[in-house]
Image (tube, rainbow, N blue to C red):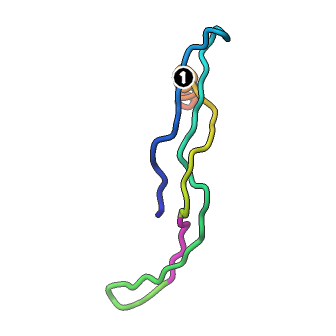
């Protein structure tokens, strides 16, 4: 497998007790990888070795929640440079 994808539990909800939004964000990413090497055979019969990173296992990892407003500001700053 060379990609990770899937659904991880991300949510935002209002907390009456804290009187604010509480957010939990996770993203799907590689947990375990292995470097693999394969022999490539070309149409002309020549061969060469190619190495790549193979994903053994994917999982959900907690990450910082970014609000849409913060994302928009970051994009605006990037355009100005």
Q: Is 43 placed left or right of 54 in the picture?
A: left
Nearest the viewer among 20 and 3 is 20
In the displayed structure, would residue 22 be above or below residue 27? above
Q: Residue at x 58, y 27 (%)?
A: 66
The mark total stands at 1
Q: Would you say the magenta stretch is mainly helix, strand or loop?
A: strand
Q: Can you give x and y, in whole percent of width and height, for residue 58 in the image?
A: 54, 54
Question: In the displayed structure, does residue 7 sit left or right of residue 51?
Answer: left
Residue 45 sits above or below residue 58 on the image: below
Give the residue drawn at x 61%, y 60%: 32
Vertical arrangement, residue 32 with respect to residue 65, above or below? below
- Which residues lie in the magenta part? 49-54
Image location (x, y in percent) of residue 25: 58, 33
Q: Which residue is mark 1?
A: 12
**Residue 71: percent from left, percent from top:** 54, 26
Q: Crowding at label 1, few (<14), some or many (≥20) Cα neighbours within 10 Å?
A: few
The image quadrant of residue 74 is: top right
Q: Position of residue 47 (x, y in %)?
A: 44, 88
């Amino acid at each position: 497998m060379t990609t990770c994808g899937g659904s991880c539990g991300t949510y935002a909800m209002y907390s009456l007790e804290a009187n604010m939004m509480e957010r939990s964000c996770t993203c799907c990413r590689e947990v375990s990888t292995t470097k693999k090497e394969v022999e490539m055979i070309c149409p002309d019969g020549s061969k060469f070795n190619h190495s790549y990173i193979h994903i053994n296992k994917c999982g959900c990892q907690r990450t910082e929640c970014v609000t849409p407003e913060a994302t928009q500001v970051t994009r605006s700053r990037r355009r100005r440079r």
